[in-house]
Amino acid sequence: MKFIDLSTTIAHGRDAEIVYHDHADGSRQIEALFKVTPDLMHAGEGWAVEEFTRFSTHASTHIDAPWHYNSRIQGRPAQTVDELPLEWFFGEGVVLEMRHKAENDPVTAAEVRVELERIGRRLKPLDIVLVRTGRDAFYEEPDYMQKGCGVTAEATHYLYEQGVRVMGIDSWGWDRPLFRQAEEAVAEKKAGVFWEAHQADLAYCQIERLVNLAPLPPFGFKVACFPLKIKGGSAAPARVVAILPD
């Protein structure tokens, strides 16, 4: 099998603050805790440890749980990330090619159907659908969150109706850029414009901030994307990996 990493690297900077304690720090800590001096440790070194001092559950490549969207979905309490079935997060992958889409021009249900027909794939329950927009090329850029076409609520409903419960995108978010939606919602004084795909009243998950979809075929591979089990979490980081046959 061939494994392709679709996840961003969690690094100290914009998305996280990480304190690194090296082996010398570890040696001092061990001596203070256990009275074991460096000469009693291999190469005089102790353990290396890292500590997050700032890291959101929505940083880096992560999976949104229904609880992120609303407290109740379809009249029932929304699921938090630790309540979701593991079966959702390992399945057949399908890539929808949408790099031609302009900024703020969201993917529609009709476009999803056309793309599925083009690649010759019929969706089935628990397929994991990945939308390739090419915006991962801007991940390190300061305006990354302002880029992307996004996906409509209508297209999200269509995918859900086919049995898809996990859908992902290689941009900052599943919806159109939030500042664009906000401008339109305020100007039109209309509900359902801002965060439309998130608040589509559907119990589904989004993988946001994917990278490296380019090597993937349209289908014929599996995706593993298990989120961390965070009690009551609205999201969790995930190591998203595509698994291809040799």
Image (cartoon, helix red, strand yellow):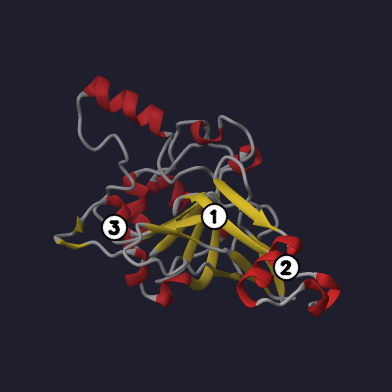
Q: CA distance from mark 3 to mark 1?
A: 24 Å
Left or right of 182 on screen, residue 40: right
Q: Which residue is mark 3?
A: 67
Q: Position of residue 185 (x, y in %)?
A: 27, 28
From the top left corner, tell me how far across and down residue 233 is, in percent.
Answer: 35, 61
What is the secondary structure assignment of the residue under circle 2? helix
Q: Which mark sits nearer the N-terminus, 3 or 2?
A: 2
Of callouts 1 and 2, which one flags the residue occurring earlier in the amino acid sequence? 2
> Which type of secondary structure does the marked residue at label 3 adopt?
helix
Q: Quadrant of the N terminus?
A: bottom right
Specify few, some or many for label 1: CA neighbours under 10 Å numbering under 14, 14-19, or 20 or more.
few
Q: Earlier in the sequence, mark 3 or mark 1?
A: 1
The circle drawn on residue 219 is none
Tell me residue 81's x, y (percent): 36, 65
Which dot, 1 or 2, sits closer to the camera? Answer: 2
Relative placement, left or right, of 103 versus 151 is: right
Q: CA distance from mark 3 to mark 2?
A: 43 Å
Q: Residue furthest top?
A: 187
Q: Is residue 174 left or right of residue 199?
A: right
Residue at 36 percent of width and 52 percent of height: 156
Q: Amino acid at mark 2?
A: Ser
Asked if the residue at tag 2 contacts the one at tag 3, i.e. Cβ–Cβ closer than 8 Å, the answer is no
Q: Specify the label residue 27 is tagged with.
A: 2
Look at label 3 and name its amino acid: Trp
Q: Which mark is residue 52?
A: 1
Q: Height in image: 212 above or below 127?
A: above
